[in-house]
Image (cartoon, rainbow, N blue to C red):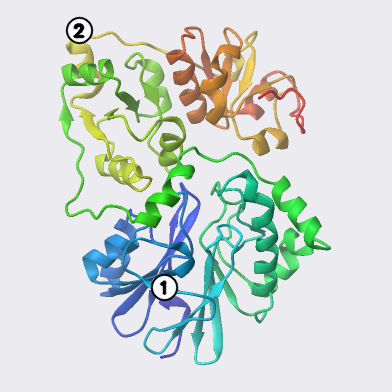
Amino acid sequence: MGFADDHLIPLVDEGLGNSAYLLDLGDGRALAMDASRDLRDLRAAAERRRLHVAFAADTHLHADFLSGAVQLGHDTGATILASAAGRRAFDHQRLADGDEVDLGGLTLRALATPGHTDEHLSFLLLDGSRKLGVFTGGSLIVNSAARTDLLGPQRTEELARAQYRSLKQLTALPDATAVWPTHGAGSFCSVPPGTERTTTIGAQKQANPLLGAPDEDAFVSQLIGSLGTYPAYFDRLGGINRRGPAVLTAQPLLPALSAQQVRALMADGGHVVDVRPAADYAAGHIPGSLSIPLRGQFATWLGWLLPDTAPIAFVTGADQDLSEIVWQSYKIGYEHLAGHLAGGMDAWLANGNPQTTTAFVTADRAAGRPYVDVRQEAEFTAGHVPGAAHVELGGLAAAAADTPVGAVVACGHGERAMTAASLLERAGHTDVAVLDGGPADYAAARGQHLVQGTEGTRS
C-alpha cells in the first residue's frame, strides 16, 4: 500500500500532554500506538474510519497512564506488541532490537532505545525500504528527551547515558523521517513548553538543545538538570502496566449518593473531591473536601494528592460529565469511586449539613497578605511576584504547617490555587484566600514587574 499523511491519526490527551496514534493500515485494520485505558477517542476515530484495531503497541511501561493495549486485546483480538525486556505478565508478541512485524504492506521495526525506561522501544515504520517515520515514545521528543529518573535516583544517570546513545541512534535516520513521540508539552515526563507534537529527524538536529550538547557528559548534565518533580502516582503505574490493567467488561459508572452516605464515607476515612469550577467551590463547599476542578489536568492532581486505596465521592455541578470523571480516574488506576453527591451542594445543605467558603479575591483586594505561589518550579523561575514564597502544589500538604497565616495562594489562573487552599483548610488554616488570576495580575495591580530566578523560594 502507499502511505498517506491521513493514514496516521494523532489522539492528543492535552491534560497529560501525551499523544496516542491510530494508524490506518489501508485494509480495514489499524495499529494503536501507546493508547491509554481511556479508549473513547481512539474508538471514535476507528469507528469513523470503519477500522478494526488489529495491533496494539506500547513503546514502554508507562508511568503516567494505564495502557489500553490489554483492553484492546480483549475487545478486538488485537495482537499486543511490546518489548521482551519489559517482562510483561500477559500474552503479547515480545520484541527485541531489530525485530520486525508485518502489518500487511507496511512493516514495523523495533529499535531498542532505553533511557526513559530500561526496556524502551521505538518503532520505525517502513514502506518497503522507505523509512516513513518513527514512533519514539519517551525517547526523542520535540526539542528534548523524556525524563530518566522514573526507576529511582540510583539509576537516573545510567539511564540518561542510555538516552544519549538512543538519541544518537535515532538521529542517524534520514532527516526527512517523521518523528511521532508520545510525550509532549504538558507531560511531566518531558520538559519544554510548546505546541508542536510531532517533528522530523532533520528538524530536531537543528532545534533540539540536547542534541547540541558537545559530548555525553554535557548531555547527561543538561538532561538531569532539567528534571522537576512528578506526580506521586507515577511510582505505581509501571508495575500495574507490567502485570496488565484489569479488563473492563462494562462501562464503569458513578452512582448517586445521598448526603448521609457522603457524610458516612468521610467519617470512615474516605475522601470527597469537589470537581466544580474554582469560583463555585469558593462560594460554598463541604468542609474537608478537596477542590480539583474537572478539566484536562484533573487526573494529574487526583493522582498526585490522594491515595488510590480509599473510596472517593465527588461533588459535581449540574452540567458536568460524570463519565469524564470516571475515565480520567480509571486511566491512572483510581477505581475506588464511591459515587457522586446526588443534588450537589443544594442536597447537602438541605440535609442540614454545614458548608465552608473560601475567599476568592482579585489582585486589587489581596493587599497586605503574604503571597504563596504554588506553581511548578520552572514556572516560578520564569517569572514571579517579588518576595513571593514558593511551594509546589504537590508538596504543599507536607509544608502546610509552615504556610504563612492569612496567605493569598496563587497559581497561573486560580484552579491549582483553589486546590492548594482546600489542602490548607484540611490542615487547619481558616484564613486562606485564593487569587483570582495569576502573578502578572498581582504585580500589575501594585505597579511591580515579575522577577526571574529562585529568589524567595522555599521547599
User: Where residue 373 sits in the image (x, y, percent)?
Assistant: 62, 25
- For disc 2, the marked residue is 352
> Can see residue 192?
no
Height in image: 360 above or below 23? above
Q: Residue at x 17, y 55 (%)?
A: 249
For the question of whether residue 360 can be seen, the reply is yes
Q: Quadrant of residue 319?
A: top left
Question: Going by the image, does 362 lie left or right of 74?
Answer: right
Q: CA distance from mark 1 to mark 2?
A: 59 Å
Residue at the image point whose x is 64% and y is 22% from the top: 442
Vertical comparison of 263 with 212: above or below: above
Q: Position of residue 291 (x, y in %)?
A: 40, 25
What's the amino acid at mark 2? Answer: Gly
Residue located at (23% from left, 69% from top):
76
Tell me the tag on residue 380: none
Query: At numbered mark 2, what does the secondary structure look like: helix, strand or loop?
Result: loop
Q: Nearer the viewer, residue 378 or 345?
A: 378
Q: Closer to the camera, 236 or 344? A: 236
Residue under pointer 1: 94
Q: Please state the horizontal and vertical placement of residue 313, each as a whole percent of the image.
A: 27, 28
